[in-house]
Every structure is written in C-alpha cells, then in structure tokens.
Image (tube, coloured by chain):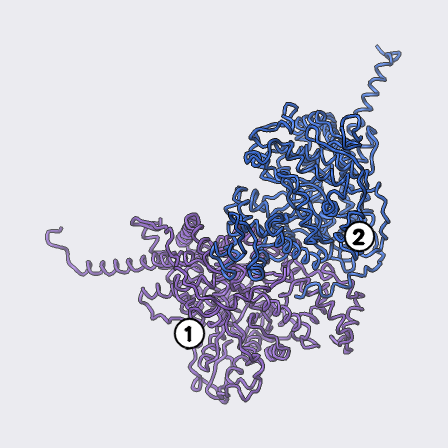
Chain colours: A blue, B purple
Amino acid sequence: MKEASVDTVDDGFKEREMPMEREYQRVSISGEEKCGVPFTDLVDAAKCVVKALFIREKYIKRSMQSFCKTTAHSLQDLGMKPVDVGVYDDIPETPVDADAPVHPPVSDTHPYDNQDPKNMPADTGYGCKMVDGVVHVYTKKVNMDKSSELDLLYPDLKEYIADMNVMMALIINGPVKSFCYRRLQYLSSKYQMHILLNEMKELAAQKKVPHRDFYNIRKVDTHIHASSCMNQKHLLRFIKRAMKKYPEEIVHIERGRGQTLKEVFESMNLTAFDLSVDTLDMHADRNTFHRFDKFNAKYNPIGESILREIFIKTDNHIEGKYFAHIVKEVMADLEESKYQNSELRLSIYGRSRDEWDKLAQWAVKHRVYSDNVRWLVQVPRLFDVYHTKKQLANFQEMLENIFMPLFEVSIDPRSHPELHLFLQHVVGFDSVDDESKPEHHIFNLDSPLPANWTEEDNPPYSYYLYYTYANMTVLNHLRRRRGFHTFVLRPHCGEAGPIHHLVSGFMLSENISHGLLLRKAPVLQYLYYLAQIGIAMSPLSNNSLFLSYHRNPLMEYLSRGLMVSLSTDDPLQFHFTKEPLMEEYSIAAQVWKLSSCDMCELARNSVLMSGFSHKAKSYWLGPSYSREGPESNDIRRTNVPDIRVAYRSETLTEELHLIIHAVRTEELDAIDEEDSLTMGPLPGQR
Amino acid sequence: MKEASVDTVDDGFKEREMPMEREYQRVSISGEEKCGVPFTDLVDAAKCVVKALFIREKYIKRSMQSFCKTTAHSLQDLGMKPVDVGVYDDIPETPVDADAPVHPPVSDTHPYDNQDPKNMPADTGYGCKMVDGVVHVYTKKVNMDKSSELDLLYPDLKEYIADMNVMMALIINGPVKSFCYRRLQYLSSKYQMHILLNEMKELAAQKKVPHRDFYNIRKVDTHIHASSCMNQKHLLRFIKRAMKKYPEEIVHIERGRGQTLKEVFESMNLTAFDLSVDTLDMHADRNTFHRFDKFNAKYNPIGESILREIFIKTDNHIEGKYFAHIVKEVMADLEESKYQNSELRLSIYGRSRDEWDKLAQWAVKHRVYSDNVRWLVQVPRLFDVYHTKKQLANFQEMLENIFMPLFEVSIDPRSHPELHLFLQHVVGFDSVDDESKPEHHIFNLDSPLPANWTEEDNPPYSYYLYYTYANMTVLNHLRRRRGFHTFVLRPHCGEAGPIHHLVSGFMLSENISHGLLLRKAPVLQYLYYLAQIGIAMSPLSNNSLFLSYHRNPLMEYLSRGLMVSLSTDDPLQFHFTKEPLMEEYSIAAQVWKLSSCDMCELARNSVLMSGFSHKAKSYWLGPSYSREGPESNDIRRTNVPDIRVAYRSETLTEELHLIIHAVRTEELDAIDEEDSLTMGPLPGQR
C-alpha cells in the first residue's frame, strides 16, 4: 500500500489525560529467608555482587558514561561514596513540555553548513602526547612534562589490572555462581507469573492509547554496520544504476593506469543486465555458520574485493562517492519511515594519522547526514595484520593514529574543521572482529606497554578495550571542559570466544553488542541485569554465524529484565525484505510469540540505550524518560504500559534491595558483635 | 530504497545459450533387494499403494483436474487403463517461443469491458435440476427425466463410498504404514546426501544465470483470503482515509435508519486519530493458539462485527465499495512488485440463490481485477448454523444455492452476464472452517441424502467435499462441451482434526491447503508424494493457530520431495511487514536455513500448483514447463538449477518404479505358477 500516506495526523500530538494505569497483580514473597539460600551464602554472594557493581560504577562514571540510576541509588545506601546523578544534569537544557509533539523540531540549517573555521571554538593552546599508550594533555605545546600536565583523569593501569583480577576471581566463584543462577531462575518465573496475571491489563492499556501502536513508536537499530546497511537487492540496484550512469568514470587505479567503471566490469565480463543477487553473492548462507572468515569474504560483491573498494568504502579513488550515495538512500528510507533510526558503524583502522580527516571529509563533502542516523566508529582489532605488513611498528602507533587527531581537534577545532563537525554526530567507539580467534596472551602487569608491543601476536581483547577506554576517558574530560559532547564505549562483546571479554565489557563500556555468551555466565548475566547494561542483540546475524535462532537467549534475557534491544547488524548479509529492522522484529515476534507490549518494550529499550541526544529522547519517550520507575514512561509516546515499566523497576529495586540489605545487616551484626565483646558477662550468668 | 526503479532491463528477455547443467553426483542403490524390506512385504505394500493411486487417478481425471504425468505413466506400465495425457492438450493454444520474454503480453482491453450479453455465447436451451444432491442436465427445460438427460459424467455415490472404504482400510494397515514410513525416511536421507554432494553445483548454476535471482522469479501466494489479504497497517490506514473521505456516506442501516460512517464511529466514540493497530486488534496473538473461535473473532475490527461488514464484505449497504477499493490497492501493490501473484479466496455461503450474482456484480461493477490475481471461491462448512437459523431446511438447498447458478450461467451465459465474466477468473473451489470441530457422523451408504439431511448436526467434512466434487465434475463436463474453462477443487485439508479429511482430499482434490496432519500419516504422506499433490503451506498461520513454527513439517516435506509451496493465509492476522509473502519466505529461509535454490524451488512449485493459465505459466516457467523431468525447467526464468529438477524427477521415477516393478513381477510369478500347475510331475520325480 502507499506508505506514509495518512500518518500526518500524527504530527500534531493531541493532549490527552491518560489515566495512569498502575494497578496490577503483584507477586510478593513473604517469610524470613526470602531468597532460597542460607543467609550466610546470601551475604557472601551479595558482597561479591556489590563489589563488582562498585567497580563498574567507578569506571563508568570516571569515563563520563552513564550508569543505571536505580543501581547507583542502592549502592549509595551503603554510604560508601557520593552518587553523581548521571551525565545529563551538568548540561543545562530547556525542558521539553509534557505534551510536546513526538517529533523534535527540525533545524532548518544543515549541520555541515557551518564549515567556516572562524565560527569554531578557539585553540586552547594545549599540547598533547601519548605516554604509555594513553594521551596526556599539557597546558602548552612545548616541553610537556608532569609539571605542565593538565589535571584530567588519567586511568591507572595497576588499579585496573587489580580490579580486573577481582572480577575474574568473582565470576568463577562456585557459591556466587549458584546464587546468581538461582536469582536468574527466580526472575524468569516471576516474569512468567507477571505475564499470566497481567497480560490482559497490559493489552488493554495499549488499546486505550489513542493513535499509538508498534508501527509509530521510535525504534533505533542499535547495531548496524554502514558498509552493510543496505539490503542485497538495494545494493544490486545501486550498482546497476551506477554502471548506467557513470560508465566512463575512473573509479580505480590499476598498475598506475586509471580504470573506468565500465572497464572494471568488462574485466570480469559482466554487464548490468547479467548482475543478480546470486552473482553478487553477499548473503550469508549455511556455509558461513561458524565460519567468520567466510562471512567476512561475503563483504566482497561477486567475491571481488575491488567492487567492495569501489562501492562500499569511504576512502577510494572516487572519495567514497558511490558509498555516500547509497548510504544517503538508506537515510532517505529511514526518514520516510519516520520512526526508524540507525546507529551506523564506520571504520577507523589506526594504520595512518589522516584516517579521521579523510572520513570526516567524506561525510562533510557528500553531506552524509540524517536526523535519523548517528555514527559509531568501529576499530577492527587487526594490529597483527598491519604489523606483519610493516604498516605499524608497535601497538602505540595504532593508538596514536586513532586518538591523537581526536585530541588535536578537541584542543583546536580549527586544526581539523571537518572532523570537528563530523564528531558532533559520533556517539562513541565500537570494537570489532572475530571474538572466537584464539588469544595467546593474558593481560596483566607483565604485559608489554603499547610502545613495547612489537610481537607478532595480536593484543588480547581486554588490552584493546582498556586502551580504548583509557584514551576515551581522558578525551571525554578534555571535551567536557570545553563544553563538547563526550563519547561512550559500545564494543562487540560476548558474541563468541572467551567469557572474560564480557568482564572487560562490564567494567569499561556503557553497553555492548551481542552478549550471547552471558547465557553461559550466570554471575555476569546477573551483574549485567543489576547494572541494566544495554545489550544490542541480532538473532538473525547470530543465526547465520554462531547460534541457531531458536537457541538464541534474547527471549530469556528479556523475560529476566535485562536491557536488551533488537538490531540488524548486517542487512546486506542477513535480511531479505525492504525493511530489515521490521523483519528482525517480525521474526522475533513470530518465533517467540512476542506480545505487542514485548515488542514496544524492546523498541523503548533501543531508544534508551542509543546515543541519540537527551533532547531527541525527551521527545521520543517523554520529557521524564531519564527518571526512575513508571514516571519515566509516557505510554502516549512509547506505547509501553506503565504496568510493564513498573514491574521492571519494582523487580530491579527488590533485587538490589535483597543484595544491599544482606550486606548492610551483616555489617550491623559485625558492629553488634564488637559491642557485645566490649561488654562483660551479665550478672547472674555463669 | 526506491522500488521497481531499474528493473526495466528485465522487460527485454535476452537470449542466452545456457549450458544445460545436468551433471551432478547421483546417489544410487545396488544389490538385489533394494528397499530394505522383505520382498513379500514390499509386494503387499506396493499393491495397496498402486490401488490408492489408481483410485485418485480415476477421480481426478473424471473431474478434469490434472493428475501428475509421471505417476500416470508409471501406472500405465501396469497396462490397466489408457492414460489421458492431462488437461491442457485438448485446449489447442499457440505455443510460446523458447526465448519469449518472462512477462506475458498484456491485453489492452479490461476483461470486464465486454459486458454486452449479445457478445456472449448463446443459450443451449438445456434444463437442469438437482437429483440426490447432484445437478443433472437435460436437453430441454421441460419434463426433465432420464430420457432427456444429457450424457455428462454423473459420479456414483456407491462407488465412491466403496473406494473411500478401501482407502480408509489401507491407510491404517500396519505393514503398509511401516513400509511407507521407511520410504519417507529413505527419501529424507537421500535428499540430505544430494545436498551435501551438489549444493555448490546448484549454487554455481544459479550464479551463471544472467539477471535472474529469487527477487525476480514468479511467486504465487497459493492460499490467501481476500478479506485478510491486506496487512493490519494497510487496513488501518484505509479506514482512516475512509473516515476522512466519506464521513457522511450512509454505510449501514440501523433499525430502519441509515447510519453514516461518521455516526458509526461516533457510536463507538472513536476518531480517526484515535485508531491504532492495537485498537483494531485484528492480529493473532498468544491467545489464539488452539482457539480457532477466538481467531475468527479477530476478523472484526475493534471487535465490532459492523466494521467487518462495512470494510471487508462484498455484500453490504455500500455494495462492498470500500472492500473493493482496498483489494484493488493490494492488487496495485502486487502489480508494482511485478513478480508476486495471489490466489484470493472469496466466499459463497449457500444461504441464498443470488449470492453468485451479487459477488460477480461486486467484482464487475468495481472492476476488481488484476493480471496478478485469480479467485478461488471458498464455501464455509456452516450448514448447521444456517439450519438452526432456519435459513436452510436441508443440505440440498445449500448445494442448490451454490451450484444451480453455475449451471444456469454455463447453459446460458446471458442469464447471468456478470457471473459469466467473473467466472473466467475463478480457478475453483475451496472448503473452509475449523477442521478440529468434532464430527458426529461417519459418511457411508446409510448417510441421509442431502435432501434428507435435516438434522442439527453439520455434515462431516467428507460429505461436504464429495458433493462439492460431484457437482463440480458434472459442471466441468458441461463447461468443457461449451469450450468454457473448468474448475478444480482445492480445499483446506489436514490443518487439524481427523486424519481422514486427507483421504477425501487425496481422492477428490487437485491440491490442498495446509496438510499439516500428513506428518502423522505416513501412508498418506507417501501417497501425496507419489501423486505429487500440491500442498499450500502457511507456517506463520500454523504458528498462531495449531503448530509452533519450529515443529512445522514444511522443511521435512520439501526435503522428501512433496510438492509444497509457501502461502500467507491471512496477512491481516499474521504478518507485520509491507510484503507478507516475502516475510513468509524470509522467515522460512532464516529458521530452516533455506538455500537460494530451495527458495526458488518453492516459488516454482507455487506457480505450478496455482490456477494461473497455461499461457501465463509458459511465460513464467518456460514453454515446456508441463513436460516431465529437467526439460520442463528453464533456469533463465525459474532460477531453479536443472540439477535440482533432475534430482526430483529421477527420485520420483525410481520410487514409482520400485512400486510398479514389485507389483508387475508378482503378477508374472503368478502366471508362471499357473503354468507349473498345469504341467504334470516331471519324469523321474516321485
């Protein structure tokens, strides 16, 4: 049918007094020992859990990423540290009206228009250099030393290694494992009961909401790679059009000689007519299962890396012109759909210092921007490859290539004007590659520092993640000082490979993609739940690579209350229809028999964990979205019943209370004991 | 992305010499006793199977439906009956050129334009009346009796009951069951080996084909109901538009007083803005599983039957205007997609004699027609309801309401001019309702004749199907005489309820919808395979009603070589995206990891079993599509590798040969024995 036809009514958001539907059937447990394990076991486990949560809170807040408020408040009850109420408060914004429309106002100027360096923030004159793999900033550009060091937060490697070891010990502790496993089971059954008792109420609440349904609530594709964000049919059509439109364009230099697009295809003797989705051969199939290498090869159209270079790279002979066009077509589709948004991954490899400028120039020159899209920058963990190719002498060079430009532009935006503009739409960093590759090194204090990392082996996942985190943290403090926005860490994590990747993810990143392996790590799964760490899951991607659909843990995570969202990862390789994100939702809904409420909750989660602005979220989810509990929900915008939100927050609060309470009472007992010791025996005793 | 943009290249179908890729790894069994069961068991089983196949052949050919050629030829080898080479040969047509385009020529006149009765075939002056539930035709309209009876084929009830009893006995025969079960297992393993050995070859063959891929091959949605052919979002938009466009239109008579569309919605106090997919509440959910009653209620928008009457009925106060519009929008989408086609079900209830005329007038008046759509007429099995409502005195009245108009229009097209035009696009009959309803009656010779069927109980499935078949058979013979096209029987069958529905389906219908229960009936499954009876399967529909997706037998059937296709059944209730059929394929592909070859085979099956014209099929599949074996395939149109087609036909031929051969040799042995008996003992013996 004709899309986007009638939906204009939606643009005017009608004020309605929605009765707060909060009454529902609650499941409560009575009796002394509530959690089904002996009190002492509870206390031991609780202590460990609390310790882990404190560790995460420390690293997340230091890096200015956001930490779950409810969890923070519970920890605060232990009175060990002052709570910092999160990331937005220090950026004053005009509050959004409760009955504001669901569509944020659109600015009439293109964000890339203002390219004149004169209008950019001035140079602070700071200098910066990398010390032991982490950039340090100095008040001046000459003789930079401790004395002139700017007091930003520079993470401490020793402390990190120590905390990491605590975490590693904790997740394999037997009693803690059984405890967490029991709690997760409990959360599953409790949800089951909630649904049986409240399903109808939730449905009724949704029906009461005027106009709103799953189709017109905001959804964010929280994990999708720009180079595969178009589906196979779209790329095919685009290539055919390009062959018609620019046959004579020089697209590539072959042995010093320029090759036109026509010549490129002639050399493969293919015509536009010949091409088909089959010849393109970019769709994952049975043979990619557990073969990440084969999967990576699928990025080459017709198996020809040259076509990948011409059509889906930003840095090529035509300066990524074709790629820019097709990404803009995808953006146009998102804008037409109104409610769908994407967080596209673009790559920085760290092979040379000018990658950032080239990438920014690509975006600015081709005006690749959409209100429906934000960027994440993914860094492939390929040091070993570049090292053997002699492109990098040591790991620190890679880190310098990745981070120095970001410091330079934050110190003096005019030094990289396009990058300054581009960065305003970059949410943060992703870390990508096949996690199942064997790792031959364990990150500890004996590990060589980045400058000394010259061996063949690739640094382990944790090493990559720590140094990304460390530099990002310093950068964020610098940028916050200047009133620039800060970045977050959102790595691929726990898709495959060793469990401990999920420990790094837990300590250092705001949220993660995949998290499949949490299903085998009860302690971590429980911690990800208590900290409400976002997990962008892509069951269709997993189905082609690592885990058959029906075994995917998404539904289990969701029922237990983990903060999961649905994402597509690579529509080019995995999806068949014109609406990959809808396809992802639809299949999940069919296979797991999701209710409309479940689907809307997933969509709301996707917005919450996304990197879209506080303002956008206020319009999309409601002005109070960042509060705790059902107050944070506006069913008129999210179509999620307050009942569901209330159930989630109440359950989380109870769970945290159980833990905190156990630790507290144990402390008090300790104090009482001391007292009783100081007292002598009472008269009459003995 | 922009649909239908570049695909024009396709309109010119380039001639290519495709090398016939027929060489592949074949699995062959050597050794004397090939089938793994003792010869005597084989013979007994084979005899039964052959008997069953002969029964089907008899009923299918008598009714002028099409019977699998390969099977017919094998039966012919037993020399028991002359084989009639099927249904097309007697309609001479101009052959389609081997390199004709894939798109049939489009006629420039609208099929409903020629409404002038004068241009219609003349009245033959025949008379007709119903005798014992079957219409008989007579050479004149007065004193119609045996003497003046036209010699058409009038099915014999006694013979049918006898054959049915043979079938019933046969499918529960232990040894036959084990035999068929073994053969089905064998077919599964053989397919498994075929894939392991030839997957790459098949893929390579597909890549070699210029331009063709899964997206631009013909697909037919072989089972979809007109009243739910639009998805929920589409219907919602349509209703909102209608409320805007025709607020003052009288749409319904309430207690003698006309009600405008505005008033109807005011009476529910709903505005266009309020409406959402949730309020519409037509989507199947967890609560419809095993609740066909609840599911039927989902046909009422907002649970209001009046909205169903206004928007998705052909016979209402506005003469089905809105329903016509929305169906035409769906048709427009199909035409835009170019390669997708649908066989939409429209209802005839049999409550009154004018239903056919009203339906035809609806279609002709609103010009509801598309080259991408053919009609099937579904008859709900609701005699008991109409009977208790006193709308029908006996079952024969229902049969008369359903069939008399068809005989009248076939005898004298000018008596029902619109119906004559409409029927040209009607493929045949479907029989619908909840098969899981208990049946209190067994169809046998003691069953009351339709005229005497006056009891409360509904006649059983087999009774409905037989009388539909019987009347259709007579009708087809009459129509063939007049050079009109004939109808086929394609009932819902084996979705739920008793197994024996599948026996009626096997004996009487060209193909069926659902067939889920074949998974519990090895003999019937094997027979459906040997007779290559089309099965239109809708796993998403089943998933919401009768069987969870991952347990659906579609993949098992396909691997064994049953003639299955994918269909949507009710996009309004089951699907989420704008492309329900693509969604159906996509989910199947994801869940069962279908290869592009599997998907293209399913699509080809859907065209083969569909009711589209011989001509259309010749363009879509290739001029020789109705031949046997790989010659029937044109990979340039179907994108199905000849290897796959060859594997299927070779496997079927071998399977049939095993059966036929067993029966043959046994006959020969019998003859030898007779000889030896006639001879006296040889000299020297005793």
Q: Residue at x 41, y 50 (%)?
A: B190
Residue A97 x, y percent position in the rendering: 86, 53
Discs 2 and 1 lie in a common subunit: no
Q: Position of residue A88 (x, y in %)?
A: 81, 42
| Residue A224 visible in the picture | yes
Q: Exactly how many numbered labels are in the figure?
A: 2
Q: A358 left or right of B673? A: right
Q: From the image, tell me which residue sits under label 1.
A: B95
- Amino acid type for the residue under numbered disc 1: Pro
Label 2 sits on residue: A619
Q: Would you place residue B542 above or below residue B392 in this image?
A: above
Residue A131 in percent (x, y) is at 70, 29
The local secondary structure at tag 1 comes to loop
Which element carries disc 2, helix, strand or loop? helix
Q: Is residue B425 left or right of residue A9?
A: left
Looking at the picture, tell me which residue is in the foreground, B136 or A318. A318
Chain designation of label 2: A
Using a 10 Å C-alpha cutoff, classify the residue at mark 1 as few (fewer than 14 neighbours), some (14 to 19) or many (20 or more). Answer: few
User: Do we see residue B602 in this rendering?
Assistant: no
Residue extending farthest to the top is: A686
Residue at 48% x, 59% y is B601
Q: Amino acid at mark 2?
A: Tyr
Side of A32 relative to A261 (left or right): right
Instruction: Give B116 or A669, whichever is nearer the viewer.
Output: B116
The image quarter containing residue A551 is top right
Left or right: residue A505 versus residue B144 is right
Q: Is residue A176 above or below residue B601?
A: above
The relative height of residue A490 versus residue B386 in the rendered view (above or below) is above
Q: Of residues B225 and A152, which is closer to you in this image?
A: A152
Would you identify the image quadrant in which residue A104 lies?
Answer: bottom right
Image coordinates of residue A322 in percent, x first then y, are 61, 54
- The quadrant of the rendering that contains the C terminus of chain A is top right
